[in-house]
Amino acid sequence: DLRSGYLSFLARPRDPRASNVANLASTGSSTAASSHHRRRSSNNFRNPPKIPTSLDTPSSSQSSGTHPSRFAQSLDPVPGTPGRLDDHMSLSRSPSPQRSGGWSSPGLTTPYNSNSRRSSPIRSYANGSANNVTWATAQARSDQVRSFSPKNQGFSRHFQNLSAKLPYFNSRDYSDKEKLGRGRWSSSAGSRFHNILAFLGRVIWRMRLRFAPVLAFLLLIILFYATPLHRVYRRKSFLGGGEKFVIMLAANQGGGVMEWKGPREWAIERDSVKNKQAYAKRWGYELEIVDMSTKKRYAHEWRESWEKVDTIRNTMRKYPKAEWFWWLDLNTFIMEPHRSLQSHIFNDLSHNTYRDINVYNPLNISHPPTDPHLDAESLSAVGDGNPKSINIMITQDCGGFNLGSFFVRRSVWTDRLLDIWWDPVHYEQKHMEWEHKEQDALEYMYRNQPWIRPHLAFLPQRKVNSFPPGACGDNGDDPKIHYKAEDRDFVVNMAGCEWGRDCWKEMYSYRQLSYRLNRGRWETFTDWLRGNLKREREEAEKVRLKNQSPGDPNGE
């Protein structure tokens, strides 16, 4: 018919390849014509048409009335894609590329990487291994972005310059072949000081085995004083023995008894407490600050100043390991904190104390007693002469016993003394007669109770209780009583400063004096430098005021 003739005209060969196209066209037309006039059967599905192995350029159009044209000649496959399809293969769908590379071809019998368990085809190389490079691996490798690494720029260039200037450390068997000393430090090229240092270094290295114990000993000393080890050593009873001593400071932190404390009283208490705290911490002693506001409890019994006895007994119960208790009044200041109580007094009690009151007897007490019924120890002027029998140590000023600074030892004898000392028979009958309260009571017992004398010893007053000028004489020239800076007295007691003297002024002056006497070389240098700068500023201020005219306050 007309359609067959038109298709035959189009299929006429113009070149050798046209014959194949004409054959495909005629076959397609006959198939289409036959299928157009009869019902489609299921045989078409049983015998599907064969798909050409290679495709060329598709037809220009595909409408409802025309069939797609076939291709006359196959082309070479694209590298990496599935190879030529054989006639015996059957595909349910056309091959499609995967996102990660390769082709999804479940029906192809192409080689694949069994290790990765992929169905993508891979190429096999003659000299390859079991793990051949797949198409996806090659594509990913080609897509890698190469990093940019600058050379000789920025910090790397600066680091190279620094490293080039560092010294070289060579072994003993190394020998420089040219230009000795180039880029290296040489002691011969330095000054004489460098040569001396190099010589000392060689000597120390040769004698390192001998210097090692010395260096280790110095290191231990530094660690001992730079760490709290020295405090632990000084505190232990079997080492330094610091825990055997308790300092009792009479303070009134809660306010005065008769009147409220002012700024000066608070300043005195602050300096006194700080001084005792630093001393106790340095030598590992215990510090017990006694609140003297408890005087109010004894006001109805006329015992406002007898609280020392009761406080000592309470402190002994509080510190059961302590042996000696040192009472200090608030108006006292430790002038030589570098001395410990052991080295200053207790290591040689027989030399630092005396028991015969006739050595210094301002009260004119008859000693020793002469009663015939007394034993030999009580009749002796020095008791048994054994320092271990001393249980209380006091000082004497120009008026007699002074309890501003004294020591009490824990013993059965001391408990007996404190009980009798605190007995109401004394303060109820003699409170109007005894001006110094418990101090006069102790003098009375010493005079009338012979059993007290063998166990009571006296310390020189300047040993632990020096007086400033104004106490026991306005001149302050008594060598047994008054403080002497050149002799470096241990403690100064500003006794009686409340009556006619300035306690804060005396406390401040002795605090500054103690600092100057005990300062180190560095403190001396800094004080000298600070003083020179202060004098220069004062002189400059005087010159400015001198050059300033009286009528012009700005000096213009």
Image (spheres, rainbow, N blue to C red):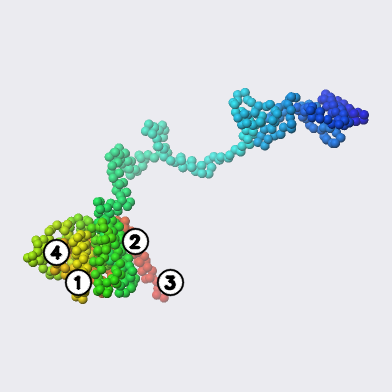
**Amino acid type assigned to the residue bearing label 2 in the image:** Arg
Q: Point out the frontmost of discs 1 and 4.
A: 1
Residue drawn at (28%, 45%), measured in percent from left and top? 217
Q: Is residue 471 above or below residue 245?
A: below
**Amino acid type assigned to the residue bearing label 4 in the image:** Trp
Query: Label 2 belongs to which residue?
Result: 530
Q: Foreground residue, 214 or 443?
A: 443
Of the two numbered discs 3 and 4 on the same chain, state the one appearing first in sequence: 4
Query: Label 1 belongs to which residue?
Result: 425
State whether residue 98 appears in this view.
Answer: yes
In space, the residues marked 1 and 2 are separated at their CA atoms by 60 Å
Residue drawn at (14%, 70%), measured in percent from left and top? 363
* Residue 168 pos. (x, y %): 41, 38
Q: Quadrant of residue 37?
A: top right
Tally the marks: 4
Q: Residues within 10 Å of mark 2 (few under 14, many from 20)?
A: few
Query: Label 4 belongs to which residue?
Result: 451
In space, the residues marked 3 and 4 are separated at their CA atoms by 80 Å
Q: Is residue 140 above or below residue 346?
A: above
In space, the residues marked 2 and 3 are separated at their CA atoms by 29 Å
Q: Residues within 10 Å of mark 1 (few under 14, many from 20)?
A: few
Give the structural element (helix, strand or loop) at label 1.
Answer: helix
Residue drawn at (9%, 64%), measured in percent from left and top? 374
Query: Label 3 belongs to which residue?
Result: 554
Q: Quadrant of residue 490?
A: bottom left
In space, the residues marked 2 and 4 are separated at their CA atoms by 59 Å
**Amino acid type assigned to the residue bearing label 3 in the image:** Asn
Q: Point out the frontmost of discs 3 and 4.
A: 4
Of the two numbered discs 1 and 2 on the same chain, state the one appearing first in sequence: 1
**Amino acid type assigned to the residue bearing label 1 in the image:** Val
- Residue 4 in the figure: left or right of residue 254: right
